Structure formats: structure tokens, C-alpha cells
Image (cartoon, grey):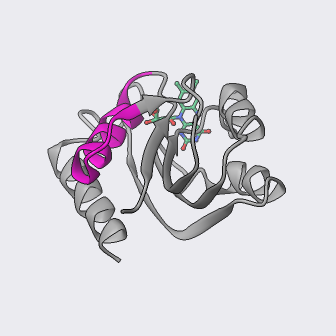
């Protein structure tokens, strides 16, 4: 049985919605990064958002402090403009010797007057499908 975990950081709740959709789809609990991984996992769904062209320092700390084995990380994010948070986290994971899968999930997240209501139920459905597909393989 594959061991799967979901960790996320979400300031205003957008990424949290996606984290919860993913977690529900794969039958685990979505937890914030403030709860470190306590055991080895085969797959970590890891989600955050960009703020002023970077991820939050707490996100970086979470990655640096990982002290369990993770076979693969699947990135997910919500953003207002950029395509993905990948560029802000991939070096940190590679420094830990952790593989960041090429595939990832990204959608728009509400930011001020932009992208109102995002992520919406369609996005959550797409995230759930994405996650199910990943664990099926
Ligand atoms: C202070 C601040 C800075 C942001 N900077 C960026 C940015 O540089 N690039 C981007 O694509 N989105 C940016 N955003 C938009 C957020 O990444 C987007 O709203 C995201 O969905 C927030 O996720 P959260 O609710 O999980 O925190 C910014 C939002 C805030 C509040």
C-alpha cells in the first residue's frame, strides 16, 4: 500500500481548498506545513502559493527541515499570475535529494479584484482527478 501525505501552506485559503480536494481524493488528511512529516512516505503532495515573486519563508523552512524519506513530491499551487511555484522550491527539494515530479497541478487563486471565486468547484474537481490519476499509476 502506497503511503501518501498532503502538506500545504495557504495564507488566504486558496491553496487550502486544493489541498483538501487532493487529500479527500486520495483518502488522507490535508495538513499544514506546521505539522512536519513524522514518517517516510512514497508520495507527498506539496502545495503553496507565490507571494511577491517567492514562496513564504515558512515553506522553505519546511522543506529544509524534512527528515524523513520521500520518494516523490508532487507540487500543486494556486497563483494570480505565474504558471507555477516550482521555480521557487525545486532547488530546495533537490538539495535534500528529494525528487520533484514533472507533473503538477496549478490553477488561479483569488487575489484582490482578480480571479474572483477561484479556485472554484471546477478547479477542485480537476485537482481531485489529477491526484487520483497520480496514485493510480
Ligand atoms: C502579498 C501577495 C503577493 C502576491 N504575489 C504574487 C506573485 O508574485 N505572483 C503570483 O502569481 N501571484 C501572487 N499573489 C497571488 C497569490 O499567490 C494567490 O492569490 C494565491 O492563490 C494565494 O494562495 P493562498 O490563499 O493559498 O495563500 C500574491 C498575493 C499576495 C496576497
Q: Which residue appears at 36% of the width and 62% of the height?
A: 1
- Left or right placement of residue 36 versus residue 136 in this view: right
The x and y percentages for residue 29 are: 33, 35
Q: What residue is shown at x 18% (from left), y 53% (from top)? A: 125
* 47, 23: nearer the viewer: 23
- Find residue 132 and report its horizontal and vertical position in percent: 26, 63
Main SS of the magenta segment?
helix
Coordinates of residue 76 in the picture (x, y in percent): 46, 51
Query: Measured along the vertical axis of the image, is residue 69 above or below residue 58?
Result: below
Determine whether, in the image, residue 74 is placed left or right of residue 55.
Answer: left
Name the residue: 47% across, 47% down.
Answer: 77
Q: Quadrant of the C terminus?
A: bottom left
Q: Where is residue 17 in the image (x, y as percent from the top left)?
A: 30, 35
Can residue 126 be seen at all in this image of the molecule? yes
Determine which quarter of the picture holds residue 130.
bottom left
- The region drawn magenta spans 12-30
* Outermost residue, front side: 1
Q: Is residue 17 magenta?
A: yes
Amino acid at each position: 500500500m502506497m503511503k501518501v501525505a498532503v502538506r500545504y501552506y495557504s495564507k488566504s485559503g486558496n491553496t487550502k481548498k486544493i489541498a483538501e480536494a487532493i487529500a479527500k481524493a486520495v483518502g488522507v488528511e490535508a495538513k499544514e506545513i506546521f505539522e512536519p512529516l513524522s514518517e517516510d512516505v512514497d508520495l507527498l503532495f506539496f502545495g503553496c502559493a507565490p507571494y511577491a515573486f517567492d514562496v513564504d519563508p515558512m515553506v522553505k523552512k519546511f522543506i529544509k527541515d524534512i527528515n524523513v524519506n520521500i520518494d516523490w513530491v508532487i507540487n500543486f499551487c494556486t497563483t494570480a499570475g505565474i504558471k507555477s511555484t516550482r521555480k521557487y522550491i525545486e532547488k530546495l527539494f533537490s538539495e535534500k535529494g528529494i525528487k520533484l515530479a514533472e507533473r503538477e497541478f496549478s490553477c488561479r487563486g483569488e487575489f484582490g479584484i482578480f480571479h474572483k471565486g477561484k479556485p472554484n468547484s471546477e478547479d477542485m474537481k480537476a485537482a481531485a482527478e489529477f491526484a487520483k490519476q497520480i496514485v493510480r499509476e
